[in-house]
Image: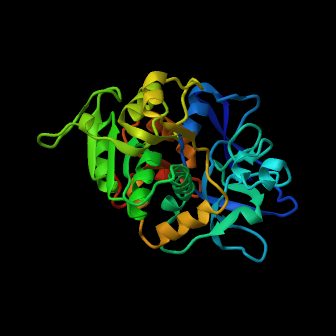
Amino acid sequence: MDHVARLHAPGDIRLSDEPPPRAGLGEVLLRVTAVGLCGSDLHWYADGAIGESRLDRPLVLGHEIAAVIDDGPRRGTRVAVDPAHPCGGCSICRGGHEELCATMRFAGHSTTDGGLRALMSWPERLLHPIPDSIGDPEACLLEPLGVAIHAVDVGAVAPGSRTAVIGCGPIGLLVIAVLRAAGIDDVFATDLLPHRVEAARRAGATAAWLAAGHGAVADEGPGRHVGDREADVVFECAGDESAVGAAIALAAPAGRVVLVGIPGDDRTTFTASTARRKGLTLVLSRRMTAPDLDRAIRLAGDRRVDLAALVSDRFALADVSAAFETATTRRGLKVVVEPAATPSRAALGAAPGAAT
């Protein structure tokens, strides 16, 4: 039998045993080893919806997935799962923007079940082998690392650019890490939570401040204030209007603001006069492109990005409700569920070097 966690209604996630999935044409069976809980999973859990999508049947959440191939000639291969399965035939896909495919199947979204289960089937072409240097708890962070890589690409960050990151949850921290790995030396960051500000410094931010509602920001260093700074490219990774306002305020004239965060009410507003006066370019970044997952694997495999430092809490699948409740508190960084873990390992704690 397959052990499965399904969301039935907001806050109502239930464990059950189901018949194991059958691999379809072009698919293989996977044994799931680790699933990271993403902000979008928390939207589903809290609201039973995200954006225009609504929960209309019990759904298996989880799209940040590490697994082992369980059948076929590649059995035993450790892989990172690309959760996006575009159609490949529409004009958007043919035009090179598969991440924007309108009929895409996406693991843990809408009617497509995700990875919070012991076994799942998925197209073999969307499975990317990972080296032994990347452990299972870190491997599920390869997908959000790919999201960060795509966001930096969308930001069109040039050498020598001044950059800022508003919101230092896992995606914001990974954007910082990707910027530093790309050779960007001027990266400053803000967040509402002190432990995330400290995590931003560890991730490589050259300066980090504690924000007050993403508005006034106090500098912890002598004689400087964030209001004295400007950034050529600002990444908004918090998903709320105050963060968008802060990003626009920090952007230099003719600068670029990349909206990465997902707003809880599906709306984003800002003061148009400020953005217009500066002549800003606002762009939105969605998910990642197909090659970004391989780029993420290379970055993590070469130890240019430390994924283990982001894993703050680990749970067995039997304690998935506790995992979601922990994630909603935002007291840590990344919460990881390990379906292969036994119930006695319910609260596995932090990975070595993890931030709390």
Residue at image coords 73%, 34%: 58
**Residue 194 versus residue 68 in the image, above or below:** above
User: Residue 124 versus residue 318: which sits nearer the camera?
Assistant: 124
Residue toward you, 37 or 175: 175
What is the number of callouts on the image?
0
Q: Residue furthest right?
A: 25
- Would residue 132 appear left or right of 293 to someone viewing this image? left
Spot occupied by residue 260 in the image (x, y as percentages of width and height)? 52, 41
* Residue sitting nearer the eye, 177 or 11: 177
Against 91, is 136 above or below? below
Residue 169 picture quarter: top left
Q: Position of residue 172 (x, y in %)?
A: 43, 46
Residue under the image location 44 percent in, 40 percent down: 254
Residue furthest left as drawn: 222
Image side of residue 165 versus residue 96, left or right: left
Q: Position of residue 161 (x, y in %)?
A: 38, 54
* In the displayed structure image, the side of residue 110 where residue 116 appears, left or right: left
Where is residue 52 drawn, in percent x and y?
Answer: 70, 28
Does residue 124 lie above or below 349 as drawn? Answer: below
Q: Residue at x 28, y 27 (%)?
A: 216
Q: Is residue 20 visible?
A: no
Q: Residue at x 53, y 43 (%)?
A: 319
Image-quadrant location for residue 338? bottom right
Residue 164 visible in the current orientation: yes
Its colouring scheme is rainbow
